[in-house]
Image (spheres, rainbow, N blue to C red):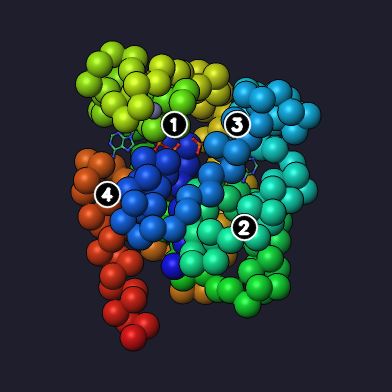
Amino acid sequence: MNLILMGPPGAGKGTQAEYIERKYWIPRISTGDMFRTAARFSTELGLQAKELMDNGQLVPDEITIGIVRARLAERDCAKGFLLDGFPRTVTQAKALDGILADWNKELDAVISIEVPTDVLIVRNCGRRTCSQCGANYHVQFNPPLLANECDICGGELQHRSDDREETVIKRLAIYAEQTKPLTDFYAERGLLISINGDQSLSAVFRDIVESLQERTRKEV
Ligand code: ADP
Ligand code: ADP
Ligand code: ZN
């Protein structure tokens, strides 16, 4: 299955991506995680991306498309993939069409998680991420068993540097302006699945699974 997971910052993409990855055995490709890893290792790309990310801005299309093209060429993507946080602009979406066409692949669905803005601000500001394995928590809605320690690997939890309120507001504005129009782009092709993300973690996942099952039933 070739899937895209869309939604504003804090919608729950990373959280749901972990569940989808485990249920369908397809690799999750998170451009945000790739940039954060590059930043941690202080590569040239990482340092450039970090400055933009901390400012709430997008990394240039050319760079982002390049890393996704290389990642999709890896062997584990042959059986399917889940793109989390890509594409984010019309240019990226068109480039993805080109990459997939080169390999005779097609998208199966684009899942868009919808959440009201006031909820998104609380979710982003309370987000904590494991510094070792990247698992996601929320101080209030999805707390770890031990304060500041990852349930899965024991790693230290961190507050993302772009999760300060003023940066979150900027990221939400960029989403509305540059990324939200992609829902129409995919709806016109009959690929869009809109999911109500303002529910519990398990209810959101249940709706995603049911919608995907409904689509595959229709295709048979
Ligand atoms: P995204 O990848 O879309 O930015 P995350 O998956 O990182 O979003 O979720 C943002 C924050 O909100 C995290 O702290 C996460 O634990 C929390 N969260 C995610 N989904 C829900 C939900 N359905 N209800 C409450 N909190 C949630
Ligand atoms: P969220 O969905 O919570 O905003 P991500 O982890 O997906 O977080 O992205 C974090 C940051 O990484 C973005 O604000 C942006 O700076 C950069 N980034 C991630 N994906 C892309 C992309 N497809 N195009 C440009 N920049 C990106
Ligand atoms: Zn961890």
Circles 2 and 3 in contact, beta carbons < 8 Å: no
What kind of element bears circle 2? loop
As drawn, is 113 to the left or to the right of 54? left
Question: Which residue sits at x=50%, y=18%?
Answer: 164
The residue carrying mark 2 is: 74
The residue carrying mark 4 is: 204
The residue carrying mark 3 is: 37
Residue 100 horizontal/vertical position (percent): 64, 69
The CA distance from mark 3 to mark 4 is 28 Å
Mark 3 vs 4, N-terminal side: 3
| Mark in front: 1 vs 4 | 1
As drawn, is 140 to the left or to the right of 9? left
Mark 4 vs 2, N-terminal side: 2
Q: Quadrant of residue 112?
A: bottom left
The residue carrying mark 1 is: 133
Circles 4 and 2 in contact, beta carbons < 8 Å: no
Mark 1 vs 3, N-terminal side: 3
| Mark in front: 3 vs 4 | 3
| Mark in front: 4 vs 2 | 2
The CA distance from mark 1 to mark 4 is 23 Å
Mark 4 close to ligand 1, CB under 8 Å: yes
What kind of element bears circle 3? helix
The CA distance from mark 1 to mark 3 is 11 Å
Question: Which residue sits at x=63%, y=53%?
Answer: 71
The amino acid type of the residue labelled 3 equals Thr
Q: Nearer the viewer, residue 151 or 168?
A: 151
What kind of element bears circle 4? helix
The amino acid type of the residue labelled 2 equals Glu
Local crowd size for mark 3, using a 10 Å CA cut-off: few (<14), some (14–19), many (≥20): some
* Quadrant where the image shows the N terminus: bottom left
